[in-house]
Image: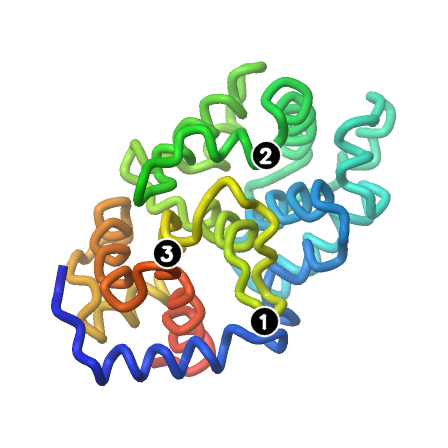
């Protein structure tokens, strides 16, 4: 853990205020769960949106909204009550390497999570430790893929236990857990605390973190997440991942 200068903290706090606001939503995958009010609709649409949140942002949004349309804009009802013939219209869906085979698996696995594990929130919350959701992500992955052989679909959920930064699932947990009082993150999950979250580390946030001295490790992996988390908690022990807005915003929108 590095000693963070007051100037760096002040700068990043300003960037959090700049980017943790509703204007951020429009161009971000978080706009997809913002279509909904029902807790389960938010959870499922957010989970699916986070799953495909890699690559061109315009394509992510287009495919995310299309996916919701294919599910009748009622993702929870679709997951819980679909028949096999309801899955036929999904056959043309593809986002990069995530295709209809993966989507159908995800829908069936999500139904199993709600029927047999109490839903997405308890499925993640069971293995959270005092200052980490990384064991929870690993355990969730095991439960998600336990019912059926995932085959090729297994690659679409990362595992921190295998060294992954698990960027998309950490982003998803940020959406569900943080109540930012700004209308971006939802704060609908109460069994995980914001101080247990990890920063969604990607190439943008990683590059900015290194330039600011918050990260020394060159790889964007689980060890880098742990290093970055320790430094972000030094600046705000209660809500460290709010700085995701600053790091990501500086990298993507300001080419810092």
Q: Residues within 10 Å of mark 2 (few under 14, many from 20)?
A: some
Q: Secondary structure at mark 2?
A: helix
Q: Residue at x 62, y 77 (%)?
A: 23
- For marks 1 and 3, the one nearer the N-term is 1
- The image shows residue 12 at horizontal and vertical percentages of 34, 78
Is 15 in front, or is 249? 15
Give the left or right position of residue 27, taking residue 80 as reference: left
- For marks 3 and 2, the one nearer the N-term is 2
Q: Residues within 10 Å of mark 3 (few under 14, many from 20)?
A: many
Q: Residue at x 56, y 36 (%)?
A: 121
Q: What's the mark number on residue 236? A: none
- The image shows residue 237 at horizontal and vertical percentages of 30, 60
Q: Give the distance between the C-alpha atoms of the residues marked 1 and 3, in whole angstroms.
A: 19 Å
In the rendered view, would you say 129 is above or below 64? above
Q: Give the distance between the C-alpha atoms of the residues marked 3 and 2, in whole angstroms.
A: 20 Å
Circle 3 is placed at which residue position? Answer: 199
Is 140 in front, or is 176? 176
Give the left or right position of residue 239, taking residue 109 as reference: left
Circle 1 is placed at which residue position? Answer: 182
Which coloring applies here?
Answer: rainbow
Is 69 in front, or is 231? 231
Circle 2 is placed at which residue position? Answer: 120
- The image shows residue 43 at horizontal and vertical percentages of 64, 44
């Amino acid at each position: 853990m590095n000693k963070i200068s007051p100037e760096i903290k002040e700068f990043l706090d300003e960037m959090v205020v700049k980017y943790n606001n509703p204007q951020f939503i429009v161009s971000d995958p978080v706009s997809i769960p913002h279509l909904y009010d029902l807790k389960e609709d938010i959870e499922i649409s957010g989970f699916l949106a986070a799953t495909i949140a890699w690559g061109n942002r315009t394509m992510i949004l287009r495919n995310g909204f299309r996916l919701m349309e294919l599910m009748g804009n009622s993702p929870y009802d679709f997951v819980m009550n679909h028949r096999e013939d309801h899955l036929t219209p999904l056959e043309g869906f593809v986002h990069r390497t995530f295709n209809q085979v993966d989507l159908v698996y995800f829908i069936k696995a999500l139904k199993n999570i709600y029927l047999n594990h109490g839903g997405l929130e308890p499925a993640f919350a069971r293995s959270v430790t005092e200052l980490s959701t990384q064991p929870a992500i690993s355990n969730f992955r095991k439960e998600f893929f336990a019912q059926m052989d995932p085959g090729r679909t297994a690659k679409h959920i990362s595992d921190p236990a295998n060294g992954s930064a698990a960027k998309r699932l950490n982003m998803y947990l940020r959406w569900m857990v943080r109540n930012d009082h700004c209308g971006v993150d939802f704060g609908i999950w109460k069994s995980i605390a914001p101080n247990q979250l990890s920063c969604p580390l990607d190439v943008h946030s990683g590059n900015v973190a290194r330039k600011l001295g918050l990260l020394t490790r060159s790889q964007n992996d689980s060890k880098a997440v742990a290093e970055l988390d320790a430094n972000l908690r030094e600046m705000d022990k209660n809500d460290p991942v709010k700085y995701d807005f600053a790091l990501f915003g500086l990298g993507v929108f300001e080419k810092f």
